[in-house]
Image (cartoon, helix red, strand yellow):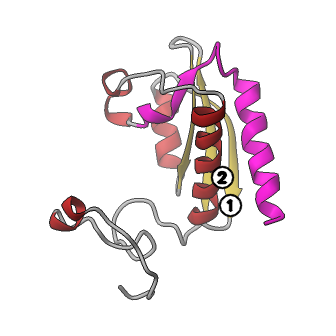
Amino acid sequence: MPCDREVTARLSKIRRGEGACRYCARYGFNLLNPAVVYVLHNPALGAVKVGITGGDERIGKYVRNGWTLLQAAGFATGAAAWAVEQAVLRHIRAELTLSHFLTAEQMGSQGGWTETFDAKLLPPDVLLQMVGQERNQMQFR
């Protein structure tokens, strides 16, 4: 690929034409462009969500579907936003031993169900604090 980065990809993805480098791929989330880590809350569903996006369109889609935007923290690159999101998700899944809360059917076309959690077990303020801590730690790496 153009960037000369070494990457690994599943054979099934390569066969489907999806095995490109995350930095060079011409589809999906762009790791080189500015991005945000967002935190959402949906009281009606009793859920919180963490995610990343390169634009406001994705967040707007959630808001139109009953989610409340609690925070959108900006990053110079998608790679930095992705690193923070992944660190938060690792902490939630490994240390707090929480699994996703909503199903693909409940999230519908907006997607992102694997990054949803029960707001009773992971209150919105705790999730916000986790994102803030990871963002602060990233500044010192």
Specify the quadrant of the image occupied by residue 133: top right
Q: Is residue 128 magenta?
A: yes
> Residue 58: percent from the left, percent from the top?
47, 44
> Residue 141: percent from the left, percent from the top?
78, 66
Residue at 64% over, 12% down = 120
In the image, is residue 117 above or below residue 9?
above
Residue at 50% over, 13% down = 45
> Residue 2: percent from the left, percent from the top?
39, 88
Q: Is residue 130 magenta?
A: yes
Residue on which disc 1 sits: 75
Q: Which mark is residue 84?
A: 2
Q: Secondary structure at mark 1?
A: strand
Horizontal relation, residue 3 to residue 79: left or right:
left
Residue at 64% over, 48% down = 87
Q: Amino acid at mark 1?
A: Phe
**Circles 2, 1 touching at the beta carbon (< 8 Å):** yes
> Mark 2 or mark 1, which is nearer to you?
2
In the image, is residue 46 above or below residue 78?
above
What residue range appears in magenta? 112-141
Distance of label 2 from label 1 (alpha carbons): 10 Å
In the image, is residue 57 above or below residue 61?
below
